[in-house]
Structures are given as structure tokens and as C-alpha cells.
Amino acid sequence: MAAPELRLRAPRPGLLALPWERPLADWLVPEVPLRDIAVGPSRHLVKFVESDGELWALKELPPRIAGREYGVLSRLEEMCLNAVRPAGLVFQPNFDTAILLTRFLVGSWQYRRLFMRLPPDAPKHRARLFDAMATLLVELHRHGVFWGDCSLANTLFSRDGQVLQAFLVDAETSEIHPGLSDGQRTHDIDITVENVAAGLLDVAAKLEKPELEPGFITEALSIRDRYERLWELLHAEPTFGFADRYRVEGTIRKLNELGFAVDEVSMLPVKEDPAGAADQVRLHVAVGDRRYHATQLQRLTGLDVGEGQARILLGDLQAYQGQLCREAGHDVDERTAAQLWVMEVATPTMHRAHAAVGGTGTPIQAYCDLLEVRWLLSEQAGRDVGTERALQALARRVAPSESAAQLIAVETPTEPFSVLDDDE
Amino acid sequence: MAAITMRNIVKKYGDGFPAVNDVSLDIADGEFVILVGPSGCGKSTLLRMIVGLEDITSGDMLIGDERVNDKQPRDRNLAMVFQNYALYPHLTVFENIAFPLRLSGKHSDEEIRKLVTEAADTLELGEHLERKPANLSGGQRQRVAMGRAIVRNADAFLFDEPLSNLDAKLRGQMRTEILRLQRRLGVTTVYVTHDQTEAMTLGDRVAVLKKGVLQQVASPRELYDQPVNLFVAGFIGSPPMNFVPARVNGNEIELPFVTVPLRDEWRDAVEDGKVYIAGIRPGAFEDAEFVDTDKASRGVTFDVDIDVTEWLGNEQYAFVPFEATPEISGQLAELASELDSEQLRTQICVELDPLSRVRSGDKATLWLDAERLHLFDPHSGDNLTRVAHERSREERGPESSGRHAATTG
């Protein structure tokens, strides 16, 4: 009987004590602290273990595939791409199999919650879902990652301000190349569109609402456009006269607004057209991380939050700085305003907002929801309704229809680590 | 359906390293061809160039009569089978097969019904169309996933290591299903695997690649019996072919444990006094006690010390260490690394009758079939004693017209 070969990146005592010498199928409660989490059908056996104060996902698969997936996930982590993080790899030579251990993504949820907990006909919420998936695909492709099996079921979502972040969960079919060909990218999108369409049709069948089908198919097809728009924007190489180089600024601003930092801008003379204007240049922008606002907020306040959240918080900070300047009758510098904002506005209000939603999600996200609700209610009322009104609305869960704040519903765990079934 | 023709296909990456180097291969309409080799041999890259997932550096890729080098994957009308075989629990078998057609928006409901029904009949799923996947057996579920590829009416099926993430039992089942389907539909099929057993059981012809270069394209039997070089000889067959030093001495070949007569037809290929590498399949040996008298004269008998035996019920193997010069050992070690193998140590593996009483540590008398031996050039690795097959009709793919050709660069 050969001992299993263990590789753990998080050598916690609880993890070490798990019965690695036995096949995953034989792991049973109460001996092993297993937790039931609905993940939908999977081709491999998946179990969740709560150990050392964290939740871990374990997947049994052939050793070769497990080793490959572990490698791919490790590379994704190095590249800071949205994906589950690998935590260990265990080979069990006696059963010719392996167990891949990943860290459960805190605060993440599966697409089915969105459909089961919110009215099924909410295209704006679904648009957030598909934007997140298209963005994830673009990010993976830009880093040479071919997913090969992007689907609703293979993606986890988490809230980030008014948008969603998507995370790759299953990398069994993924490959990492120095760069992707157009064929590879198109193929990956084709697979995604087909998988998402089928996933949506499955939801319509489950809800017994066949009338949703045509809309669902159109929405699945829209992922391609969402992807292409973003890809084009990141890879456009416009040409213009050297005298018009002020246009560079507009391009950079557009990228920044979408959250992308710009690492380098180069303008190269256009040579291939001798008949053309002599001073033509082609702009090439090396696009960096998608944490433009997050980096800025962190620099000013020390807060480390998602890009979508940072965007909202920076807006709030700027409004506050404006107010300070008016009250003081002179300029208040950014740094001072930021410090005051954290102490006097953000920290106390975020805790009140978090309490108002019953501690669901994170305080930061609760604060972002509060700002959104306040803005939407004010827009309806034609005047600023103020924080208290917004807090009340948030506490009573009367967020305006299809506002991002409604998504609190998907964040609420049914019960912490309770048994979730397909019909949650 | 269509033939697939590759002419001098080259794939170079940014660093100039050719992942696929001057591969020419004709796949006839309806033929089942396997691309096989150890990891890094270029087989998946080649498949991806057929599908359109990799740009082709140079050469021509033809599907039917059309050059497709610059076509998008979805315009090539090929079906990648099992790239995803997720079944959707709330959709019926019918809908699980039909949804790619619905998505394409090119078919009326009536056409979809016809295509799905036909595919289901081919796959013997006709009675189960209204069922949900949960009510199907494992094999039936796999067939539903195949149905999705069939309804596309693709010109060819492509498989990229489709069984590698399945457990052993399901792998066996699927292999049978794939073979049955391919025979039934007669659709041109290219199948990539690193598993030589899969390659040998599935393909009409098998193309063996090493470091981006095509080594040999032939029927499984020809690859096994008449490999072109040491690499193919070592890659095909399990347990692998034994390689031992062989010195030609007049009318004889001296092996580490026995001397065999030099056959007349080999005289022109070898030089007297030189050392070659002899390749002998484990099955060319036998416990001398179990050799019929009419067969015995074809071979030679000799005594050896048995190191270890492995009895597997219906087969039995014995391992016999031998001495080799540093030069030959070095050659064999290099070959082992090329093959991703750890098995080619300086011992031979001998297949014995399962009833043989020979046990570990015994001195045993073995018999070797002197006709089943190949001599390889120790430097080039070429098989010097290969007899090119005039392939019989049944060994070829269906409807093959003898226009298969393979050249290596």
C-alpha cells in the first residue's frame, strides 16, 4: 500500500489530518467535516471540507489532468487573474487517481442563485452576469489563456460595487500560450456562447417558463458582442496626424474609466503608406492591470477593495472633497480630504449600512449599495433624499427594481455552510 | 464529408522553435486516423491547425479541395467532439442534442426535429428522446454528447485526447462507442492521443510524431511489426520492445545472451563486425518447454538467470538483466527520454506462457523466434531490416484509394 503523495500550499493542521489515504468517495461525516454546497452536475466527484476556519473544495480526477489543472491554476494566480486559487495536489497511487484542493472563494456564488432568488425576468441583472463573463474572457485571452470550457456552471461570481466579478473555476481544459491566435479566441467565445445558451435554456426548463427561451438565446449570443467591444477597445491602434496627438489623452481616459491602467503609450510613424500624409502616427497602448480606481483609492486611503467598488467610493470621496472646499472657502488637498472622508464618512456609514442589510456581504459592498440606493431614490425624487432615507430603504430591502443593490439577495447565504440543494 | 490534406505543414512559435516540422499527410474521406506521440511531439498542435485554432506558419491545409489556412474555425465545418460533454439536467435528451442547432438560427423547427431524430437513431437513442439525462446510463449519456456533434453535419470529427480525463471503466466504454459511431457514419476522423493502446485499437492508420516530425504513418499492425526506426519501435507496443546490442559476426548475430543466425536478406543492410541495436518484442520469447516442435526449429534456445517474474493470470512476464557497452547504454537512455519512458533499462522483458513454472531467481531455458527480430542503426536509429508492407486492402481505411502518402521532413 503506497502512501499518498501530498503537496499542500497551505499546510494547516486540519488539512494535514484529512484521510488522504482513502478515496474521496469514502470520506464521510462526521469523521470528515464535509459541507454540502450546490455546485450542479460535475463530471468529477467534488466535495467541500471546512477546516482550519476556511472552506476548501476537493475534486477527484485522473493524476495527469489533476497535475495539469494545478499547474494552470498556479499560473493564473501568478498572473493575478480571476480564478479559484490552488491549495494542494494529492496523488493516490493506490487508486490511480488524484485530488485537487482549491480554496473556496469567500463571498462568491453560483449563477443559479440569481435566477432562483430574483424575479426571472430581470435582464439587467443578467447583463451584469454576462458583462462579467465577457470581461473575464478578455482578461484571460489577453494573458494567453485559452479556457476551453467557459460556462455558467464553471464560473463563480462575486459582487463588486455595481458590477459583478467572474472567476474561472474549472481549468481542466485550459491551456496557457505565449499569445492566442484569433482562431483560439473565436473558438473559446463559440464554446462560451453555446454553453451559456444551454445553461439558460436549462434554467428556463427548470422554471417551466418556455417563454423566456428566445430572450435567453439572444442574451447568450450577446456575450460575443460584449467581448468584442472590450477586446477592440483594448487593442485598437488608431492612426492620426502627429499634430493631433492630444487624442492620446482621450484614449487613455476611456481605458481608465473602464478600470484599466495604462503601462505605456507609443506612437510610431506610419511607414507602409508612402503616398499618405508624412506625419501620420499609429498609437499603441500597452494596457496594464484592471485596477485603475482600486490603486488610486488604495494610495489615498489605504483601503484595498474591488475595482468596481473603488470606482463608486472615489466618486463619493470627490463629492466630499468638493463639499469640504465649499465649506472651507479654499482648496482642500486630496490627501487630507481622503483621510477625513475615511474617518468621518466612510467608516461610520459603512458599518451602519452593513448593519442595515443584516451583516450580509462586506461592509464596503453595503456602503456601495447604500450610495447606489441613495442616488436612485434621489433621482426619482428630484432631490437628494439623504443617507437616512437610503438606509431605511436598504434595511427594508426596497431597493429600486434591477438596481445592483437588489443583488444582496444572492449574497445572503441560506444558512452559513448549511445543506443547499438544487432548489434553494 | 471530406478528405483532409496536409502539405508541408510547419508551425513555428515566436522563439523560432518548430513545434510541427514539414508534416505532409493525406487523410482519405471516411478514414479514422490517429495522431500519437509523447508529450511535446506536436500532435495537438497539428490537430489545432486542422481546426483553425493555431495559425499555420507555412504549408497548405486542405479540407476537401479547399485551402482553409485562413478560415475561422467555425467556417471550416468540422466538429470537435467532446470538447464539452456537459449534459443539462432539466433539458430532455432531444433538447440536449438540439440546442446547438437552435443557437445557430439556421434551421426551422422541422429541420431540427429531423436532424435530431436521425442522429438519435444512429446512436440508438431514439426511444429516449423525451427523457432527462439523469434517467440514462453512463454510455447513453456519452452518446447524447456525441449526438451534439453529429447534428452539425460536419465534414470531419476531431478528437483531442477525449478520454484522458475519464476513469478507466468509462474510458473503455467510450472507446467502443467512438469506434462504433465512426464505423456507422463513415465520417473522416482525426483523433489525438498519447496512449498507444488507444491508438492501436481505434485507428485505420496511426501517425507517429516525434518532436514535430512525422515518423511513420501506417496501420497499427504494420507499426507493430515493421517500425521504421527505434523511436516508433519503442513507442508502439506494451510492454515495449526490448533493445539489446547485436554484433554481426560472419553468419551470425551475437546478442548478450544468445547467438542467432544472420538471415540472407539482411546481409546487404549490415556490415560484418559492426554493433547494431536489435529490437525484439517480449512475445518473440517463450519458455522453451512450451514451444511446439514444429515451431522450435525456427528459433534458438539458451539459458539465462531470471531476475523477476510477473504473473498476471492470462499472461506472464520475466525480466532478465544484460550487459551493454557504455555507447549502447547511452543510446538507450536517450531513447527512453525521447519516449517519456522509464522502462528501457538494461534488462529484457520476456513473455512466457502463463502456465510456465519459471520463477524469480531461477535459471531458465528460453526460446527466441529468430525471425522476429529487427536490427537498428545505433546512430540514425533507422530500422535496417524493415520489410515495407504492401498493405492489404482490409488494413486500409474504408474507400481508401491508395493515395495515402506520408513523408517526413
Image: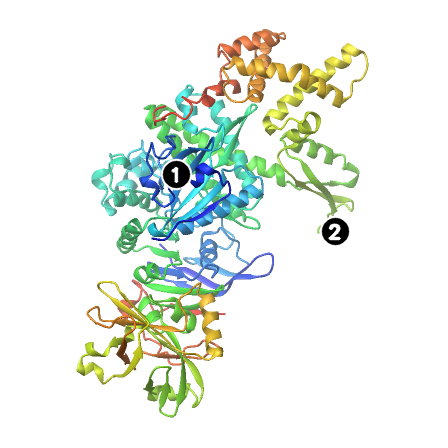
**Disc 1: which residue:** B106
Q: Which quadrant is the C terminus of chain A positioned in? A: top left
Chain for disc number 2: A
Nearer to the camera, B360 or A205: B360
Chain for disc number 1: B
Total number of numbered labels?
Answer: 2
* Labels 2 & 1 near each other (Cβ < 8 A): no
Residue B294 visible in this rendered orientation of the protein: yes
Residue occupying the point 27% across, 35% down: B134
Q: CA distance from mark 2 to mark 1?
A: 45 Å
Circle 1 — which element? loop
Nearer to the camera, A151 or B153: A151
**Disc 2: which residue:** A274
Residue occupying the point 37% across, 86% down: B253
Q: Position of residue B32 (x, y in %)?
A: 34, 59
Classed neighbour count for the residue bearing mark 2: other residues with Cα under 10 Å, few (<14), some (14–19), many (≥20): few
Amino acid on which the number 1 mark rests in the picture: Lys
Q: Quadrant of residue B104?
A: top left
Classed neighbour count for the residue bearing mark 1: other residues with Cα under 10 Å, few (<14), some (14–19), many (≥20): few
